[in-house]
Amino acid sequence: MLQTIGAPAIAILVFAVILIWMTVKTVPQGEEWTIERFGRYTRTLPPGLGFLFPVMDKVGAKINMMETVLDIHSQEVITKDNAMVVADAIAFYQVIDAAQAAYEVRDLERAIRNLSMTNIRAVIGSMDLDASLSNRDQINNRLLTVIDEASQNWGVKVTRVEIKDLAPPADINEAMARQMKAERTKRADILQAEGHKQAAILKAEGEREAQIREAEGAREAAFLDAEARERLAEAEANATAMVSKAIAEGDIQAINYFVATKYTEALRDIAAAPNSKTIMIPLEATGIIGSIAGVADIAKAVVDKKG
């Protein structure tokens, strides 16, 4: 009797476990599951605990809602100027609508990869080789705009598309290396010429400044020399006036002083002449002595007056 009662109980228990397993579903964080009823999509289960109608409902697709990295295979691309380059890229996308990602496209990753490869050929093919190698940011932005717009119906958001590598053929690499070397040599020659030019300008400016300062010094010296001559002439004029006044007053010693002074200056100038080695001049000793004596008498008279 117990065995007869135990078998149905076990069967009911097993059926209850299976029923619970079919009814209760736990969705992991970062995923969403689509629910189908008799093969038709009805709703989406978010992360957490969910409940289904047994037999009628089943899980259709388990969609990863986290951002996904998609490696895009390298391919050969012909540029606008008929140069061959090998392009390698990577894309980042995130599913924002699990139902569209599950039912609007078959094999989502393959579709995004093929779409990306096609647009890479189109974008790079519309640019020259130099432009494609130097404008990667522009290429990335154009690819992102086109691919994101084309994949909106699939329930995904393409967040980034990056060109990892653009490799031109070996002969083009060699030509580019020669061109770069020539450009660097040209820049070096230009910098060297600019240096020589700047040095010549600075040298000319220095010489000009030196000439200006030399001219200013000569002008200052001439001014001082003229001023000295002017003062000397003024002193001589004053001396002549004083001698003339003394003569008018009958002072014979003033005449002797004046004659002796001029006589001595004349002898000094003759002796200082550069062409004169030996000077033979007949001199009257008494005249010189008399002149000197006259000077002495004048000096004595001046001292007596002061006393």
Image: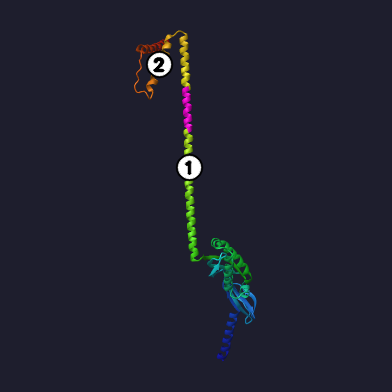
Which residue is depicted at the point 43% across and 9% down? Answer: 252
| On screen, residue 99 above or below 9 | above
Q: 26 left or right of 307?
A: right
Instruction: Please tell me whether the stretch drawn in magenta is mainly helix, strand or loop.
Output: helix
Q: Is label 1 in a helix, a strand or a loop? A: helix
| On screen, residue 223 above or below 175 | above
Question: Which image quadrant: the N terminus?
Answer: bottom right
Q: Please, what is the three-letter code of the amino acid marked with disc 1?
A: Leu
Q: Is label 2 in a helix, a strand or a loop? A: helix
| On screen, residue 191 above or below 248 | below
Q: How crowded is mark 1: few (under 14 residues within 10 Å), some or many (20 or more)?
A: few
Residue at image mark 1: 202
Residue at image mark 2: 263
- Highlighted range, magenta: 215-229
Q: Nearer the viewer, mark 1 or mark 2?
A: 2
**CA–CA distance between discs 1 and 2?**
57 Å
Q: Which residue lies furthest to the top in this view?
A: 250
**Residue 260 lies in quadrant:** top left
Q: Please, what is the three-letter code of the amino acid marked with disc 2?
A: Tyr
Question: Which image quadrant: the C terminus?
Answer: top left
Residue 307 seen in this snapshot: no
Instruction: Find out whether residue 15 is within the magenta segment.
Output: no
**Residue 154 lies in quadrant:** bottom right
Which residue is depicted at the point 48% across and 41% down? Answer: 204
